[in-house]
Amino acid sequence: MKRRLCSLLLLAAWTALLLGGCFGRPLGQPEKPAGGYEVKDSTGYVLRLPQKPQRIVSLSIGTDEILLALVPAERIAALTYWVDDGGISNVTEEAKGVPGRVKASAETILGLQPDLVIIPDWQPAELVQILRDAGLAVYVYNGATTVEQIKQAIAGIARVVGEEAAGARVAAQMDSELAVIGETVRQIPAGERQVAVRFTLMGGSGGRGSTFDDICRYAGVENGAAMVGLDGDGSLSKEQIIAINPDLLIMPTWDFSGQTDMQQFKKAVQEDPALQPVKAVRQQRLIFISDRYLYCSSQYIVQGVRALAEAAYPKYFGPP
């Protein structure tokens, strides 16, 4: 009787061991390889990755553009649904190699079975927690508004995808292009420096600390909105625009709805009776620079710097 009880106890222990192994990971799934690496995100959360991720999901257009410069398309499970819109995306062609498109929906993301989700810090914290609770590796980075912040974001994303050398190359290319622009800008006399106001469908915008403000700084252009103390992406009144009297008005090229005729909008601004005293209106210097550069939070911001410098200083940079 005692021998039979011992046998039953041994069988129960062996069964428990087997079941514990099954519940620890799905049947047929190999154990994580030894090694791997750790990365800390912008919130201080530490991700532990067993290998370079092979099914990455991106949740911002900026991340889309950065990722496609760092890893082969085969390693990306999905990009944002904005990536195919040439009005706001700089990588419509490159994105064709990635089959998936995604919105910030936990259900959709989970269905893609990613091994890494990259998300900017302006997305809801609740979404991040839901994905982590489901067992996904989620890397949160600081949403970038300046050139330096973009380079920091590139370096962080490069670390988490295991491609630090590629990230360094992208940042170095940015620095190289900005240095060429800066060399020309330094030759422009102070008396020839231009003042620009960025116009949106809501009016003048792009104050201190905005992406446009940083683009102006690298392009050697005075940001009119910052000159009158506007912060961030607030709006200028017509009275403020008249007081600034900018040399250039930068016109919008894209909107979320896709319904606005930008040429008609430009015409309305040009013919607005209240704006006739403005130098840019009098001289018909209402300039289109693509919003895919001016709203940029990736390495393509350099193209916005060049486009603005060319528009402001055609004598030095040649025609835009």
Image: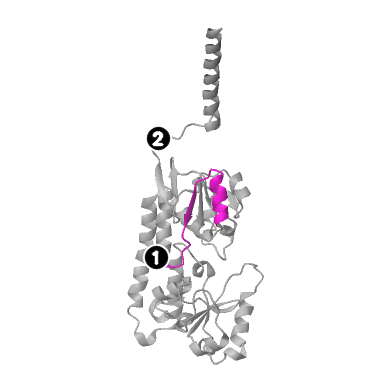
Give the CA distance from mark 1 to mark 2.
Answer: 36 Å
Using the rendered image of the protein, determine whether residue 171 is visible from the camera's viewpoint: yes
In the image, what residue occupies the spot 41% across and 49% down? 39
Q: Residue at x 59, y 70 (%)?
A: 254
Per the rendering, the mark at residue 172 is: none
Identity of the residue furthest to the bottom in this view: 277
**Residue in the image at 42% along x and 64% along y:** 149
Amino acid under label 1?
Glu
Q: Which of marks 1 and 2 is nearer the N terminus?
A: 2
Q: Mark 2 points at which residue?
A: 34
Q: Residues within 10 Å of mark 2 (few under 14, many from 20)?
A: few
Disc 1 target residue: 148
Residue 109 relative to residue 141: left or right: right
Q: Nearer the viewer, residue 25 or 19?
A: 19
Where the N terminus falls, by quadrant? top right
Q: Give the range drawn in magenta.
A: 125-147
Query: Judging from the image, what secondary structure is the residue with disc 1 in?
Result: helix
* Whole-percent x, y for residue 202 in the image: 60, 77
Query: Where 122 sits versus 319, above or below?
Result: above
Q: Is mark 2 on a helix, strand or loop?
A: loop
- Given residues 155 and 219, the one toward you in this image is 155
| Residue under the point 55% across and 19% down | 12
Q: Residue 181 versus residue 223: which sits nearer the camera?
A: 223
Residue ranking furthest to the right: 259
Residue 127 magenta-drawn? yes
In the rendered image, residue 210, in percent from the top left (x then y), is placed at 47, 72
Q: Is residue 319 visible?
A: no
Circle nearer the viewer, 1 or 2: 2
